Image (cartoon, rainbow, N blue to C red):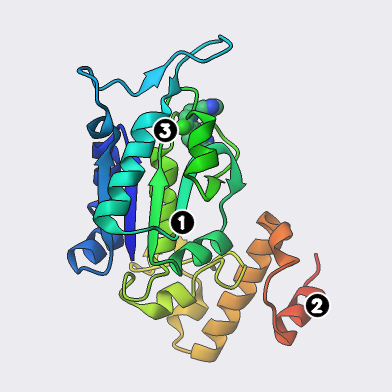
């Protein structure tokens, strides 16, 4: 999978992509990610990327020309992308389903801005979609771009070493995860549930399934409506109604 990121803060984005499963997948050649410095696509002496807003008001707006030049360079050097996503608080909410859709693409471009936002003509003429990662206010599109890349990349075959761990993921089934424990079996007076030490694999499976269902009902009942539940799981929820 090819990904290009356009930003005035390439070091933030590079730092977020250098380590962990994404970093390893880049080294392994599974992910071909290039981070572009928007200022390299300016033509003035001072590499200015922002300007005052038409109509007045506070703050600065990102100029369109450097984004157009960056996209032209990406098309020439890297080919035509399938998706050009602009990160924006006004975008469509990103989700696990959105991550799956992007993970199936061959070439993604992510446009990051700062200040009050990017000139609307960048969205109109260059972006195929506008994405928000959630309802809270960040200072720019770099952290959202990292979240989108991480979520999509880990669904690309080979990026996460163990396919089973992606498969077992919370959200892949539409439920929250069960609680995890490792050694020691007792820590600061807190005991790991006996069943997990028992070696009874069928009972462990059942305990985890029930714990995931219980947690999801308590913390995210909204998820249960669209979760993929089998007959046993529906039955457990009915029987254990509290
Ligand atoms: C914030 C953002 C997302 C996402 C892109 C650009 C400028 C600062 C800003 C903040 C509030 C209102 C501008 C961005 C985000 C999110 C994304 C930009 N800002 N206007 N904030 N929070 N969930 N995606 Cl460009």
Q: Name the residue under label 1.
A: 83
- Front position among marks 3 and 1: 1
Q: Do the residues labelled 3 and 2 touch (CB within 8 Å)?
A: no
Classify mark 2: residues with Cα within 10 Å, few (<14), some (14-19) or many (20+). few
**Residue 89 rendering spot, x and y as whole percentages:** 56, 36
The residue lying at 48 percent from left, 77 percent from top is: 167
Mark 3 neighbour class, 10 Å CA radius: few under 14, some 14 to 19, many 20 or more: many
**Which label was assigned to residue 239?**
2
Residue identified by numbered label 3: 113
| Above or below 203: residue 16 | above
Of the two numbered discs 3 and 1 on the same chain, state the one appearing first in sequence: 1
| Residue 83, placed above or below residue 162 | above
- The quarter of the image holding the N terminus is bottom left
- The kind of secondary structure element at disc 2 is helix
Q: Can residue 140 be seen in this snapshot? A: yes
Disc 3 C-beta below 8 A from ligand 1: yes
Per the model, the C-alpha gap separating discs 3 and 2 is 51 Å
> Would residue 189 be seen by someone viewing this image from the given angle?
no
């Amino acid at each position: 999978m090819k990904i290009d990121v356009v930003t005035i803060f390439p070091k933030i984005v590079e730092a977020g992509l250098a380590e962990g499963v994404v970093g390893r997948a880049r080294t392994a050649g599974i992910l071909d990610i290039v981070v572009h410095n928007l200022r390299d696509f300016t033509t003035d002496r001072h590499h200015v990327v922002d300007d005052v807003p038409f109509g007045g008001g506070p703050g600065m707006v990102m100029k369109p020309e450097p984004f157009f030049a960056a996209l032209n360079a990406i098309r020439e050097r890297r080919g035509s992308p399938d998706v050009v996503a602009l990160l924006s608080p006004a975008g469509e909410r990103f989700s696990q389903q959105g991550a799956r859709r992007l993970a199936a693409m061959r070439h993604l471009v992510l446009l990051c801005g700062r200040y009050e936002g990017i000139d609307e003509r960048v969205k109109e003429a260059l972006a195929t979609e506008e994405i928000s990662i959630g309802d809270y206010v960040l200072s720019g599109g770099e952290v959202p771009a990292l979240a989108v890349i991480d979520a999509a990349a880990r669904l690309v075959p080979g990026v996460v070493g163990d396919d089973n761990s992606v498969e077992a993921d919370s959200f892949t089934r539409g439920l929250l995860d069960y609680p995890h424990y490792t050694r020691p079996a007792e820590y600061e007076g807190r005991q790991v549930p006996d069943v997990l030490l028992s070696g009874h694999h069928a009972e462990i499976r059942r305990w985890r399934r029930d714990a995931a269902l219980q947690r999801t009902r308590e913390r995210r009942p909204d998820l249960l409506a669209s979760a993929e539940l089998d007959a046993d799981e529906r039955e457990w929820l009915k029987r254990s109604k509290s």
